[in-house]
Image (tube, grey):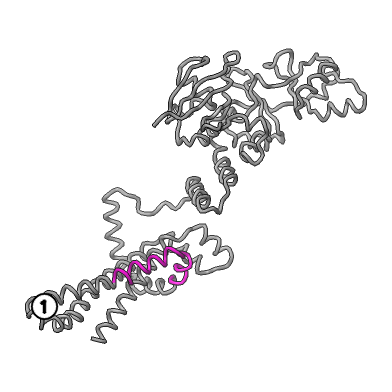
Amino acid sequence: MLSSLILIALLIAASAFFAMAELSLAASRRLKLQQLADEGEARAARVLQVQEQPGHYFTVIQIGVNTVAILGGVVGEGALTPYFDALLRPWLGPERAAQAGFGLSFALVTTAFIVLADLLPKRLSMNEPERVAMKLIAPMAALTLALRPLAAGFNAVVDALIRLLGRPERPDNRITAGDILALTEAGHAAGVVADAEQQVIENVFELDTRTVESAMTSRERIVYFALDDDEALVRTRIAESPHSTYLVCEDEIDRVVGYVDATDLFQRVLRNEPISFRADPSLIKRVLMVPDRLTLGEVLGQFRQAHEDFAVIVNEYSLVVGVITLNDVMSTVMGSLVNTADEEQQIVRREDGSFLADGITPVPDLQRALGLDEMPHAGQYDTLAGFLMVMLRRIPKRTDAVEWGGWRFEVVDVDSHRVDQVMITRLPA
């Protein structure tokens, strides 16, 4: 009996070894392994190599697991059943004692394998997958080398079956934006990533999906100068609407000449020099013009290429729809970390749980505030006002309302056909 128990213990240990080797490799995070490999950990590099082509590795594991399982059943039944039979025979009789002995032997061996060869090693592997995988990579590499011919034969059969089913033969290990976001969301749920940091990370990946219209200063809010504006008007406009940059136009906003930097104007004032755009065209700088369908990521590329931080946004009819600065893009990325007072007022949560939102609130900000995963007719609009127009199929008026995703969007203020304020309330369950 002692030798049988020792053999069963060895089989359990072997099964535990294969279980830990399998789960640790599958659960190991590639980013963590790559970081360890970059720090000089050779075992992490070997684990990464196996993850790239795990075919023989997992085949050897399955050979070991199934062999051990079969041997465990044979040895366990033969080792313990006679002793249980002899123990129970005085009370149950020969036939029932044999049946009960077999049942007890089966239950005991099965329980030992489930707990000690499966649950416990897998739990340990899940808790520290990279550490376990690096410890077991060397013995597994030796086993894989020894059983390589047998594993190659099994793999050839499996590859043929996979091709017959029309499925991919190799795993897709490319890291996507969704993978990174899922990782940061897990960190946020664990308290490692702060709320503001999580928002910044999400905003960075939205740069390639948000259009410039979601971050621009809209046409009606642009402060600009005409070429023939006199100095008194320029001074008054700067005092009333201080900005770092102003458009300069030929009479109307759609005839853009360029832009002027407020710093240059202030220097003129300090030196008591006259300000005249028509007489001194050197004040006017060439402005970057970008189409309204560009994403924020593409605008950043345009800024970098042109060495500018200010651009005019025009539509397909060459009409100005807004302006955007590098600071606007960065504010979109940084979110609540750098929001100005005006930006904070775009969507405000009220005490009763409802929201009061500006019509120009970008759709991603609206979704984040309301917890909406998707919006109807996505891609046809960029702001809350655009959403209402698409849903109503007309210019919204006061008291117009739209219901979507468990929320009611009611227009409460319209300023010259522009949706100014929208009340958003949750619908009853």
82 or 348: which is nearer to us?
348
- Residue 134 counted in the magenta span: yes
Provide the major secondary structure of the magenta segment: helix
x and y percent of residue 302 in the render? Answer: 65, 34
Residue at position x 32%, y 49% in the image: 167
18 or 43: which is nearer to us?
18
Q: Which residues are magenta?
A: 113-136
Q: In the rendered view, does 161 fall on the left or right side of 100?
A: right
Q: In the rendered view, does 144 fall on the left or right side of 161?
A: right
Quadrant containing the C terminus is: top left
- Residue 429 counted in the magenta span: no
SS label for mark 1 = helix
Residue 70 versus residue 356 in the image, above or below: below
Tell me the quarter of the picture where residue 414 sits.
top right
Quadrant containing the N terminus is: bottom left
Residue 228 versus residue 35 in the image, above or below: above
Q: In the rendered view, does 96 fall on the left or right side of 356?
A: left
419 or 407: which is nearer to us?
407
x and y percent of residue 71 in the render? Answer: 23, 75
Residue 74 versus residue 257 in the image, above or below: below
Q: Residue furthest front?
A: 352
Q: Which residue is mark 1?
A: 98
Instruction: Classify mark 1: residues with Cα within 10 Å, few (<14), some (14-19) or many (20+).
Output: many
Residue at position x 30%, y 57% in the image: 159
Tell me the quarter of the picture where residue 382 sits.
top right
4 or 297: which is nearer to us?
4
Residue 306 versus residue 8 in the image, above or below: above
